[in-house]
Amino acid sequence: MKLAILSREPKTYSTRRLKEAAKKKGHTVKVLNTLKFAIDLEMGYPDLYFKQKKLSQYDAVLPRVGASLTYYGTAVVRQFQQMGVYCVNTADGILNSRDKLRSFQILSKYHIGIPPTAFVRDKKDVLPAIERVGGAPVIIKLLEGTQGIGVLLADTLSTATSIMELLQSQKQNVLVQKFVAESKGKDLRAIVVGDRVVAAMRRVAKGQEFRSNVHRGGMTEAIELDDVYKETAIRASQIMGLGISGVDMLEGKDGPQIMEVNSSPGLEGIESSTKLDVAGAMIDYIAAKVDFPEIDLRQRLTVSKGYGVTELFMPKGSEYIGKTILDSGLREKDINVLTLHTEGKVIPNPRSDRIIKADDKLLCFGKLESMKELIPEKTRKRRRPKMQQLSKADLEVVKTAEK
């Protein structure tokens, strides 16, 4: 495998370790400065130049894009993607995780623990927002920041209001977030590689500092996460669209609370604490993806006109409840069940004798017209009024799509 590590700092611990691990495993690897790329755009020929020369062919890219270079760095990563080069973390995945508001918006859609969070712009909304997340003390965060920079603890309502108003007067976008008191001064960092946690540690703040980041003097200890915390970290990473990530969690009384999903996690603290070859695990994962690439189903299925992938919900009263997948008649309708979500479990490629239960969700591939017919009548009626609010031009687009 020929691997490119995108980094402006080749001598940092993380970049050095990744390069060493790749070489040790027999791969060709180069560290390329993200700012030395030029992006060329031409119909049908996306291309990249590095230091004024056309870039040679690479099998994979491992982005280590710093926060200050998010826009240009993700543009370079996106260009690699357009050229068909495997990127372990995509441009969209990096953008999703880098913006704290965006990441919490995405995570909030799923049944995954996050502290109550609010984002406000109007001065009049500050006090109600603080009350909604549980009142003082609260955490106030700048939308972009790493290593604990831009994270403040406000002990009282008046202090929180003053901080919010000051930051807003400086045109700063800020979040207000519930302070998880039982986890004060400590958090968990899990390194997720693909669909597994390869290492985890607990970070404990020094003295009265409430931020436990290693860069702020926090102490670390290796730990073995239980299954609930592992599952939460893996799901958060996958929801963000990342192949490799560092997931920071608080140990709340109701279970894990996601604080941040980092697309470029540092390796020094986790490797020193756990004595594990985290860099090697990352390289192995990338090499396996290059050798056995996964297909983006959404892009491939556009080739088959009239076919697609959708998720079907089975409400109480559905005629399919109590039937097996085989007896449901879905296959006769040219519909194949790819994954079954039932009672909190995800079952890929379910057996034909699996019984469909109320509130199950079926991820299906098949004829779109047949799958539309499975949408309950009540759901169709609820959706219809929303369509009437569209403009005439939008209604024509919807009608065309339905045909």
Image (tube, rainbow, N blue to C red):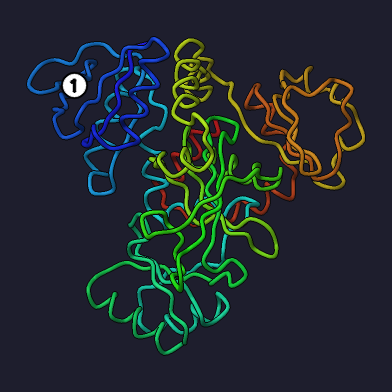
Q: Position of residue 281 (x, y in %)?
A: 50, 25
Q: In this figure, which residue is indicated by the disc labeled 1?
A: 48
Can you give x and y, in whole percent of width and height, for residue 243 in the image?
A: 48, 31
Query: Which residue corresponds to the image point at 72% horizontal and 21% vertical from the top-left?
Result: 336
Residue most toward the bottom?
158
User: From what the image shows, is residue 107 above or below residue 335?
Assistant: below
In-image side of 222 versus 395 (left or right): right
Nearest the camera: 157 or 102?
Answer: 157
Residue at x 74%, y 50% (from the top left corner): 378
| Residue depicted at 69% across the width and 26% down the height | 370
Residue 376 % position (x, y): 75, 43
| Residue displayed at 63% across by 55% down | 256
**Residue 342 vertical position relative to residue 133 in the rendered view, above or below:** above
In the picture, the quarter occupied by the N terminus is: top left
Q: Work out whether 15 lies above or below 237.
A: above
Q: Position of residue 154 (x, y in %)?
A: 43, 80
